[in-house]
Amino acid sequence: MADLILTNVRPWGMKAVDIVVSGGEIRDLVPAGASSGPGERVDGGGGLLALPGFINAHAHVDKSWWGRPWVPYGGEPTTLGRIAHERAERDALGIPSAANSLTVLREFLRHGVTAVRSHVDVDLGVGLRGIDAVREAVDALGGAIEVEIVAFPQDGVVRRPGVLDLLDQAAANGATSIGGLDPAAIDRDPVKQLDGLFDIAERRGVGIDIHLHDGGALGAFQFELIADRTRRAGLRGKVNVSHGFALGELPPERQADLLDELAEAGVSWSTVAPVRMAPLPWRGMRDRGMPVGLGTDGIRDLWSPFGDGDLLRVALDFARLHGMRTDEDLAYAVELATTRAAGFVHRGIHDLAAGAPADVVLVDAENVQDALMRAPRRELVMSGGRVVVQGGELLV
């Protein structure tokens, strides 16, 4: 990849620098105007704020009907009701398809998302077609966005004989993680579901990512099962809980004990900061070193008409939900969408620093906090050293 110099930008709102890029990585940051040597010079817009590319730690890029005619919301407003509605309607909408996934991935890019951890449905009706469609969409973008795939059993695991075999096939064919869904409420046999998932993860060397919507004591019980199995399987750093609403609902003492247990087991967390849900104990999670990632979940799909692919808005939702006010806390919300999410896409470093992937987002903002509050247009997006958005317009 050709060398490139992004000139006169302010990383995290600090003093202006030139970012020197080589081989798709950041090689150096030097004072603005001091860069020299080979490489195309790209004007940073006279001191625009620079942030690392956003990492979407929880998406469903196989489900969206973004870019298609409006689809009215329908079905029963429960997890089982949403599953049934989706399975009844998805074929008529051409879900999954490479074209649909490509459209939503391009929208992510336009908003500065350069890496995605996407759950992709694997079930008896669709088989592995969704994974194939997502990979085709990623290939069509020629490396402009990185997508890690979680093979996700949206329709259940134990209650659908044959799904474990599909998850095993997906893991054998390159999925970096396999998913689970409400082991108690959906499968009504949490031990059996976890036995099946951990068996595959241990044999195939993949991670596990479990959607857990159950609240209160039932949710807490499953957190304990997950932490215990993670320790026994030696999968520290490879198991994630998505949503995990119960964690915010528990009494403080019970909550603290669970946080200790989950942190010791090395379990991470991802959230979409949904309204009307109990706030997560984010300070306790941060202080214990628990990785937390932010995601869009599905956008404009058969589960919900909401969402636009802008992870900066999700970070703002997280800040609002958790009552963040100080500059330090507001900057932390943006870090959750960038640097602190590196592990969700298996990156050792994701920042505006030497040795990091050259993923850079420029916005017209005074500082990080101003960018969070206004979520301004992405003036430039660089992904792996390649400019993919300029003046808010996609170049891919």
Image: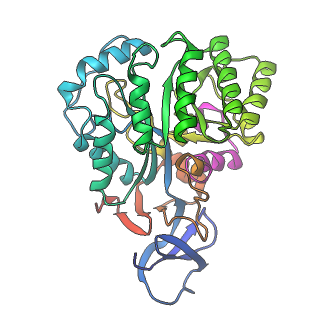
Camera-side residue of 162 and 322: 162
- How far from the left and from the top, in percent, is residue 178? 48, 34
Q: Is residue 334 magenta?
A: yes
Main SS class of the magenta portion in the image: helix
Camera-side residue of 22 and 8: 22
- Tell me the residue at 57%/22% (across/down): 194
| Residue 77 drawn above or below residue 271 | above
The image quadrant that residue 79 belongs to is top left
Left or right placement of residue 225 versus residue 35 in this view: right
- Tell me the residue at 36%/39% (across/down): 61
Residue 153 visible in image = no
Query: What range of the chain is rendered magenta?
Result: 318-340
- Tell me the residue at 58%/74% (across/down): 16
The image quadrant that residue 152 belongs to is top left
Q: Is residue 390 magenta?
A: no
Q: How many marks?
A: 0
- How far from the left and from the top, in percent, is residue 50? 53, 64
Residue 49 visible in image = yes
- Tell me the residue at 49%/67% (across/down): 358
Rendered-image quadrant of the C terminus:
bottom left
Left or right placement of residue 354 versus residue 169 in this view: right
Left or right placement of residue 58 versus residue 391 in this view: right
Left or right placement of residue 153 versus residue 318 in this view: left
| Residue 214 drawn above or below residue 135 | above
